[in-house]
Image (cartoon, rainbow, N blue to C red):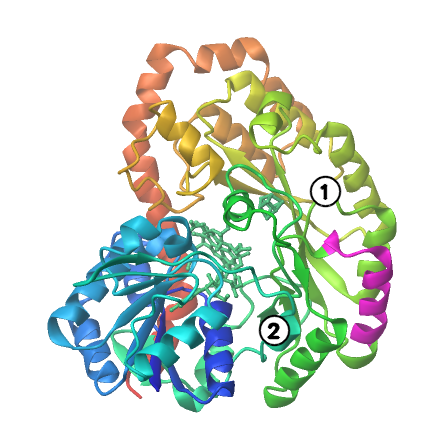
């Protein structure tokens, strides 16, 4: 069967479509991928998930999918509006069955089944293969687990299958560029090595020369189930099943070795696992030995406080870990309960931060994630987090998120039940960093500006914060908020423009 897969993500790694493509290809289907990363509208408007693709782009997609038998689209919740518009436009013009998969169809299949012909709930490799086989043979896919659909004969909601136990059975992500297209400016062009090199160039900053980053994953799933995260949904979806699965070390090394042989300019690896340190010390040591021997490139990984002690950190440093991101989120006890992160507290964080300083060189700068604008938190809760952070040894960078309610998560349901959001709201169509102007947010930003801790502590003194929370000040800030947001958006646009403008000019005329 001839299948097209579309990925709208700004990040061209798009492991989902690349893995699905290689899985289907290995089983005899022919697969083309189109990467529809809408850089031009991002440069124009900043990240705006409510933007549609321009008509000229949609026309090219329609042209490209002509003659194919099945069209698959991957989407996170943020892309729901954009992909709905694209799907409707394609359906008006072309006669091709469309299947949606990815995080949003997994958490909100009822909504998606009204738009796409088929919806894949959960992992897609086996489900998409079986769906393609059914359609090829003219069979109604009533027995294909994970697949939902509505047709003239009625609605079918097949149950979900167990997540794949052996991830080594999935071939490596598909980087056959000759079967791939990419949106550059307003043209869909054949993917080539120059474009790939530009797209993977140093968005994450390591020290040293220009870096070109290959992204992959060792595991699927996370041992935790924080209530704002997809993993809280997956635990319910896959009740009783093993959700955390780990590829063999040989498979990971072979994949990276292969891709570095194919593209020898790759010189950094980014492991996107939810918690890279959830492996045991023994597994990490084996990984270190093989990685050092066969790959040797510095790498980046996300770590959770629960899994990372001094011993694991030193194994990881020895293996080549040179940049990391660690979730703090909050230090308020009640919020950690709300987030189901009771394993986390100030002492644990301080322990970890001290171990980081002990194991890594003084220049090593971890990123700590913090979630702001939680409607259940009081200013005192936020200041508890701020004060705890100020105790951490520098250097570090704070990555400031705002709480976003994603459908399917425990917190989304709570927020709906308490009337904080309405079920129909698409409150998740925002960038997670889109902060409003408030005194407390400002204090957190000062931490990144490396102001002396004592000064920030003084500014966080309760009487001052009470004054800044008073109605006149709040009113003044609310008036300034639109200006602040516009300026922030302009800053983002300018940064994106600097990064991608030349690239778009160079390639759009190809
Ligand atoms: C890596 C990652 C990123 C990377 C790269 C994403 C990319 N495009 O490749 C980066 C850092 C860029 C990123 C950014 C964001 N991310 Co992110 N990210 C992840 C992460 C950790 C892994 C995703 C992944 O590659 N998984 C591996 C693949 C194989 O799994 P998968 O995508 O689920 O695909 C499987 C199935 O879903 C299905 N499937 C997928 N697509 C399709 C298509 C078809 C046709 C079919 C049949 C099946 C199918 O089959 C696949 C194979 O089994 C997840 C968390 C997680 N553990 O899932 C969060 C996650 C996806 N991200 C999330 C979010 C919110 C974001 C941001 C919006 C945050 C922000 N800054 O505002 C941004 C937006 C990105 C953008 N602008 O494009 C949320 C999404 C929640 C939601 N409801 O949508 C997640 C789930 C994390 C969370 N907290 O819950 N992210
Ligand atoms: S530790 Fe991170 S990835 Fe794991 S459940 Fe919590 S937020 Fe999600």
Counting residues from the start of the chain, the first of labels 2 and 1 encountered is 2
- The residue at the point 57 percent across, 37 percent down is 370
Is any part of residue 449 visible from this angle? Answer: no
Q: Is residue 406 left or right of residue 332?
A: left
In the image, which is nearer the foreground, mark 2 or mark 1? 1
**Residue of label 2:** 210
Residue 328, position as x, y percentages in the image: 64, 37
Q: Is residue 278 left or right of residue 210?
A: right
Label 2 crowd (10 A; few <14 / some 14-19 / many >=20): few
Magenta stretch, main secondary structure class: helix
Ligand 2 sits in which quadrant? Answer: top right
Residue 61, position as x, y percentages in the image: 23, 77
Residue 121 or residue 330, whichever sits in front: 121
Q: Is residue 281 magenta?
A: yes
Label 1 crowd (10 A; few <14 / some 14-19 / many >=20): many
Instruction: Point out the image quarter for the N terminus.
Output: bottom left
- The residue at the point 11 percent across, 70 percent down is 92
Residue 17 or residue 457, whichever sits in front: 17
Residue 258 or residue 171, whichever sits in front: 171
Note whether 202 is above or below 330 in the view shown.
below
Residue 377, position as x, y percentages in the image: 51, 22
- The residue at the point 54 percent across, 42 percent down is 232
- Highlighted magenta segment, given as a residue range: 277-292
**Residue of label 1:** 305
Toward which corner of the image does residue 158 lie, by quadrant? bottom left
Label 2 to label 1, Cα distance in Å? 30 Å
Note whether 383 is above or below 435 in the view shown.
above
- The residue at the point 66 percent across, 24 percent down is 387
Toward which corner of the image does residue 84 lie, by quadrant? bottom left
Asked which secondary structure carries label 1, the reply is loop
Residue 179, position as x, y percentages in the image: 40, 88
Instruction: Point out the image quarter for the C terminus.
Output: bottom left
């Amino acid at each position: 069967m001839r299948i097209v897969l579309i990925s709208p993500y700004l990040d061209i790694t798009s492991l989902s479509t690349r893995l699905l493509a290689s899985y289907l290809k290995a089983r005899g289907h022919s697969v083309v991928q189109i990467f529809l990363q809408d850089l031009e509208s991002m440069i124009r408007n900043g990240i705006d998930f409510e933007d549609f693709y321009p008509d000229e782009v949609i026309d090219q997609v329609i042209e490209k999918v002509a003659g194919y038998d099945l069209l698959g689209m991957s989407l996170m919740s943020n892309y729901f509006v954009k992909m709905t518009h694209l799907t409707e436009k394609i359906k008006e013009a072309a006669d091709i069955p469309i299947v949606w998969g990815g995080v949003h169809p997994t958490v909100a299949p009822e909504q998606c089944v009204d738009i796409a012909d088929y919806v894949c709930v959960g992992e897609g490799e086996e489900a998409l293969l079986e769906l393609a086989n059914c359609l090829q043979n003219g069979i109604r896919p009533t027995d294909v687990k994970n697949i939902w659909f509505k047709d003239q004969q009625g609605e079918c909601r097949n149950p979900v299958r167990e997540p794949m136990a052996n991830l080594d059975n999935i071939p490596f992500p598909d980087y056959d560029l000759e079967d791939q297209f990419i949106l550059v400016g307003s043209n869909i062009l054949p993917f080539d090595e120059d474009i790939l090199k530009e797209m993977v160039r140093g968005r994450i900053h390591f020290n040293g020369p220009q870096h070109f980053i290959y992204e992959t994953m060792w595991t699927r799933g996370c041992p935790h189930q924080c209530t704002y995260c997809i993993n809280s949904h997956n635990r319910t979806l896959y009740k009783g099943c093993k959700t955390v699965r780990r590829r063999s070390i040989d498979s990971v090394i072979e994949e990276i070795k292969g891709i570095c042989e194919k593209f020898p300019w790759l010189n950094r690896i980014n492991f996107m696992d939810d918690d890279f340190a959830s492996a045991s010390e023994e597994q990490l040591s084996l990984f270190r030995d093989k990685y050092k021997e066969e790959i040797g490139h510095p790498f980046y990984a996300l770590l959770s406080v629960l899994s990372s002690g001094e011993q694991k950190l030193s194994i990881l440093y020895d293996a080549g870990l040179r940049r990391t991101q660690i979730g703090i989120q909050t230090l308020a006890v009640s919020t950690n309960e709300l987030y189901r992160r009771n394993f986390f507290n100030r002492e644990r964080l301080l322990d970890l931060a001290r171990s980081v300083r002990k194991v890594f060189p003084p220049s090593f700068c971890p990123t700590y994630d913090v979630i702001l604008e939680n409607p259940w938190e009081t200013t005192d809760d936020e200041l508890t987090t701020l004060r705890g952070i100020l105790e951490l040894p520098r250097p570090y960078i704070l990555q400031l998120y705002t709480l976003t309610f994603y459908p399917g998560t425990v917190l989304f349901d709570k927020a709906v039940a308490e009337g904080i959001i309405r079920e129909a709201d698409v409150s998740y169509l925002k960038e997670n960093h889109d902060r409003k102007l408030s005194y407390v947010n400002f204090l957190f930003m000062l931490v990144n500006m490396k102001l002396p801790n004592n000064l920030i502590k003084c500014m966080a003194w309760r009487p001052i914060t009470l004054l800044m929370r008073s109605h006149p000040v709040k009113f003044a800030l609310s008036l300034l908020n639109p200006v602040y947001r516009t300026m922030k958006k302009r800053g983002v646009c300018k940064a994106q423009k600097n990064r991608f403008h030349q690239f778009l000019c160079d390639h759009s005329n190809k």
